[in-house]
Amino acid sequence: MNNVNDKVEGASRFWDKDYVLGIDIGGTNTEFAVVNRRGDIVKCGSIPTCGHKDFHDYASKLKTAVDDCVAKAGVAGHVRGIGVGAPCANQYSGCIEAATDLPWPSPIPLAAVFEQMFSLPVAITNDANAAAAGEMRYGQARELKNFIMVTLGTGVGGGIVCDGHLLSGSQGFAGEIGHVVVKEDSDRLCGCGRYGCLETYCSAKGVMRTARKMLAESDEPSALRDVAPDELTPKVICECANKGDALAKRVFDFTGRVLGEACANFAAITDPDAFMLFGGVSKAGDLIALPMREALEANALHLYRNRIEILFSSLNDAEAALLGASAMAWDIE
């Protein structure tokens, strides 16, 4: 790493450069973009994540595609650094550690390989922290010094900003709020191997599990009964709820209350100004936010009541991951 850093210190580390690269590594595809200081995506592209014989082959293909993107954007020589969002990314070691959704064995020395290939400084973090960084730099959290980003997607993640700093922890894994156990004696097994984690209730899978359970436990008429099991997504449940389906509404009421109770406990740790919701499940809007608010106020310590906001991310869904990753690159020292 020292040799790489020495090389980067020379020609590439000019901090007055006006562009960064954001790279979002997913299990299926890897997206990348050239981003300016205002948070505008100047040019973007993608390659498949899978289908490469090893990580170095993947990195080489990515390098070719990114170089082409930078050239077409007309900013060659004007890129400051690279920010990467990836599952199980450890910003301290620069490695992806124990990522089950990627096709290569861990640990993956992502930062070292990318720095060597691109001759640029690289910062990596997990997707939830990237979302928080993006919201803090480009979104409506620009004026907030204390907030918790809650990502409600395939899983549940958290990015914790305290006194203007993104909390990382000793190993870079701070903010794993999805794996806080919220229901004792729960029968919901989490991917982490424990039962009753927040993720098993408030992720997309958790919402679908709640819906199936409510359908099985009652004979109540519901439009959800006409939906094929593999099509019972949070989006479909939300559509039914917005049309007045009582059972569908209760699915989100239950989900919001579980989330609000958990956030009441999280509030006591960092004293946040707001909880920022992001991800597919958050598209339910007030269906989830109103019961979350009620549960938060009912369960929070009196010091935190009636002053913590519940906000929705202002970043465009299609761009949020890339912007979040790119935000990390501006602060590389």
Image (cartoon, grey):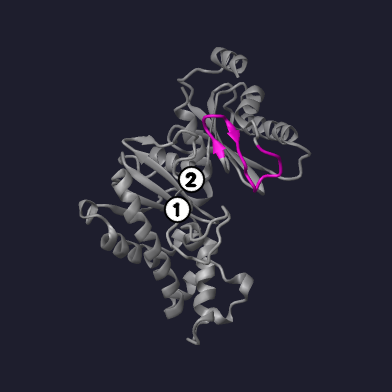
Query: How packed is label 1: few (under 14 Cα within 10 Å), some, or many (20 or more)?
Result: some
The residue at the far front in this view is 185
**Residue located at (71% from left, 44% from top):** 103
Relative image position of residue 234 (x, y in whole percent): 51, 66
Residue 128 disc label: 2
Predominant secondary structure, magenta span = loop
In reply to whether residue 126 is colored magenta, the answer given is: no
Residue denoted by label 1:
180
- Residue type highlighted by circle 1: Val
How much space separates mark 2 and mark 1, taking CA atoms?
15 Å
Q: Quadrant of residue 231?
A: bottom right
- What is the residue that sits farthest to the right in this orientation? 53
Residue 268 tag number: none
Residue 30 % position (x, y):
64, 43
Give the SS element for disc 1.
loop
Residue 113 or residue 323, whichever sits in front: 113
158 vs 259: above or below: above
How far from the left and from the top, in percent, is residue 241? 44, 74
Does residue 161 appear anywhere in the picture?
yes
Q: Is residue 94 magenta?
A: yes
Picture quarter with the N terminus: top right
Q: In which quarter of the view is residue 122 placed?
A: top right
Nearest the viewer among 118 and 188 is 188
**Looking at the image, which residue is at 30% across and 46% down?**
272
Can see residue 235?
no
| Sequence-first tag of 2 and 1 | 2
Magenta-tinted stretch: 89-106
- Is residue 284 depicted above or below 267 in this figure? below
Circle 2: residue type:
Ala
